[in-house]
């Protein structure tokens, strides 16, 4: 649903994806990462940087793929 909002240009998609990126479910975090990659927004970049450090490899891979394939650009100097 969040991805659909993004494609329609709704900022609510970003908020939904940011919320989902904190889910206890790794599948939800992975999907959130892919959705966050659709945004060219500093908040999305920060969330993806955090997901790159997720405890589970599939979530980290989703975050990396989102950065490589999407318009989001990692922020410089952010850990």
Image (cartoon, rainbow, N blue to C red):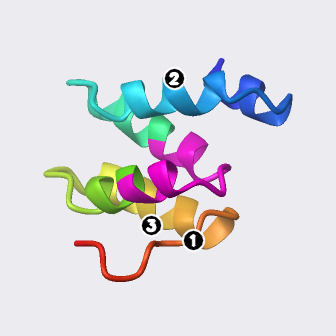
Give the mark nearer the N terminus: 2 vs 1.
2
Q: Secondary structure at mark 3?
A: helix
Q: Quadrant of residue 30?
A: top left
**Horizontal and vertical percent position of residue 48:** 40, 56
Name the image quarter holding the N terminus. top right
Note whether 32 is above or below 45 in the view shown: above
**Horizontal and vertical percent position of residue 65:** 53, 64
Note whether 69 is above or below 25 in the view shown: below
Predominant secondary structure, magenta span:
helix
Tag 1–tag 3 contact (CB < 8 Å)? no
Q: Secondary structure at mark 2?
A: helix
Give the mark nearer the N terminus: 1 vs 3.
3
Residue 64: which numbered mark, if any?
Answer: 3
**Horizontal and vertical percent position of residue 8:** 86, 28
Give the CA separation, mark 3 to mark 2. 20 Å
Tell us which disc is closer to us: 1 or 3.
1
Q: Which residue is mark 2?
A: 16
Give the CA separation, mark 2 to mark 1. 19 Å
Residue 40: which numbered mark, if any?
Answer: none
- Where does the magenta region start and end? 33-46
């Amino acid at each position: 649903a969040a991805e659909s909002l993004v494609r329609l240009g709704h900022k609510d998609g970003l908020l939904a994806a940011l919320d989902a990126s904190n889910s206890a479910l790794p599948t939800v975090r992975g999907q959130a990462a892919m959705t966050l990659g659709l945004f060219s927004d500093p908040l999305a970049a920060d969330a993806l940087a955090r997901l790159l450090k997720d405890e589970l490899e599939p979530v980290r891979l989703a975050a990396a793929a989102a950065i490589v394939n999407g318009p989001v650009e990692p922020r410089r100097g952010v850990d």
